[in-house]
Amino acid sequence: MQASKQHGKFFAEERGGGEIGSCILESYREAARKGPALLLAVMRGKAAEGVDLRDCEARACLIVGVPFPQLSTEVDLRRQSPGGARWYEAEAMRQVSQAAGRLIRHQKDFG
């Protein structure tokens, strides 16, 4: 998606990612280096973890909702074990911390 030049460019990480996700991420990085750009990403997606967004590539992070782990048999069993509710909440907060960590990557960076 592209908005007017005045407002910059918009990019959205798609579910599943793969090669298309890598192309979107690279396009976003290039646009962010040239001017205003916005990347919409999902928690637990490629852009939220394992991607190094430096300097002008990440200046703000808005998290909507609480990123609890997706329910599965393993997660449900772990939640029912002693301390499981606390683990479940801690996993969500770890995800928030990971996303916020995309902003400041070195001593002179800011976000």
Image (spheres, helix red, strand yellow):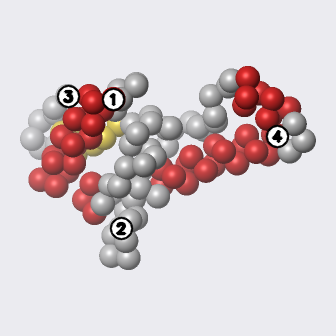
Question: Which element carries disc 1, helix, strand or loop?
Answer: helix
The residue sitting at the bottom extreme is: 107
Which of the marked residues, 2 or 3, is nearer the chain's N terminus? 3
Q: Pointers 2 and 1 in contact (CB under 8 A)?
A: no
**In the image shown, does 101 or 60 lie closer to the viewer?**
101
Q: Nearer the viewer, mark 1 or mark 3?
A: 1
User: Which residue was labeled with disc 4?
Assistant: 84
Q: In screen coordinates, is 64 left or right of 79?
A: left
Question: Which element carries disc 3, helix, strand or loop?
Answer: loop
What x and y, as percent, mark residue 3? Answer: 16, 33
Q: Pointers 4 and 1 in contact (CB under 8 A)?
A: no
User: Which residue was labeled with disc 3?
Assistant: 1
Q: Image height check: is 100 above or below 4? A: below
Question: Which element carries disc 2, helix, strand or loop?
Answer: loop
Distance CA(mark 2)–CA(mark 4):
35 Å
Give neighbour class at mark 2: few <14, some 14-19, many 20+ (Cα, 10 Å).
some
Distance CA(mark 1)–CA(mark 3):
18 Å
Which of the marked residues, 4 or 1, is nearer the chain's N terminus? 1
Distance CA(mark 4)–CA(mark 1):
32 Å
What x and y, as percent, mark residue 85? Answer: 81, 40
Q: Nearer the viewer, mark 2 or mark 4?
A: 4
Give neighbour class at mark 1: few <14, some 14-19, many 20+ (Cα, 10 Å).
few
Q: Amino acid at mark 2?
A: Phe
User: Which residue was labeled with disc 2?
Assistant: 110
Q: How many marks?
A: 4
The quadrant of the picture occupied by the N terminus is: top left
Q: Residue at x 40, y 25 (%)?
A: 16
Distance CA(mark 2)–CA(mark 1):
29 Å
Q: Amino acid at mark 3?
A: Met
Q: In screen coordinates, is 96 left or right of 21?
A: right
User: Which residue was labeled with disc 1?
Assistant: 18
